[in-house]
Image: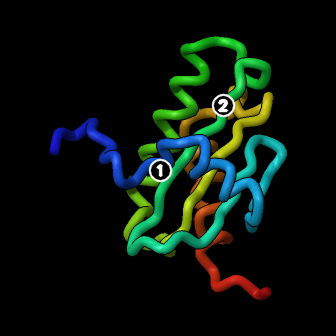
Amino acid sequence: MSKHAFSRELRLLTPEHYKQVFQQAHRAGSPHLTILARNNNLDHPRLGLAVPKKQIKTAVGRNKFKRIVRESFRQKQHDLPAKDFVVIAKKSASELSNEELFKLLDKLWHRLSRPSRG
C-alpha cells in the first residue's frame, strides 16, 4: 500500500455510516473540533470527516485539516477501539499549527479510547 493510501475499510463512506454515528455518539470536544465516536461491529476503527466550508473557508485549509486528522488517525489506529469516529472541524481549527492540531487530536483520541462509563 502506498504511503499516502488511506484504506477504504478505515473510512466511513456512506451517509448511513455518518447518520449512525450522529445518532448515538460519545463525544470529545475542544473549542477547535469535536470528535464523535460510536461502537461499530468491526474489528477496527473507522474515520469520517466533516469539514464544512462555513467553518474553514479555503479548500487549502480544509484539505490541510483533513490530511492532519487522517495522519493522526493512522498513527493511532492500533490503539483505538473498534468505533466509528467522525471529526468535525470548527472555525478556530484553521488557526492551529500542525503540531497543536496533532496534540489536540492525541488528547481526544485518548479520551475516546477509554472504556465508556455508560
Name the kind of residue labelled 1 in the image. Ser
Circle 2 — which element?
A: loop
Residue situated in front as seen by the camera: 104 or 21: 21
Name the kind of residue labelled 2 in the image. Val
Q: Which residue is mark 2?
A: 51
Q: Position of residue 27 (x, y in %)?
A: 76, 62
Label 2, residues with CA under 10 Å away: few <14, some 14-19, many ≥20: many
Instruction: Tell me which corner region of the image, top left, top right, bottom left or bottom right, holds residue 29.
Output: bottom right
Q: Residue at point 52% right, 24% down?
A: 63
Circle 1 — which element?
A: helix
Label 1 and label 2: CA atoms lie apart by 16 Å
Q: Residue at point 61% right, 33% down?
A: 97
Q: For the N terminus, which image quadrant? A: top left
Label 1, residues with CA under 10 Å away: few <14, some 14-19, many ≥20: some
Q: Residue at point 71% right, 19% down?
A: 53
Judge whether 46 appears above or below 92 on screen. below
Could you say which disc has been placed on residue 72 in the image? 1
Q: Residue at point 17% right, 39% down?
A: 2
Q: Position of residue 14 (x, y in %)?
A: 53, 42
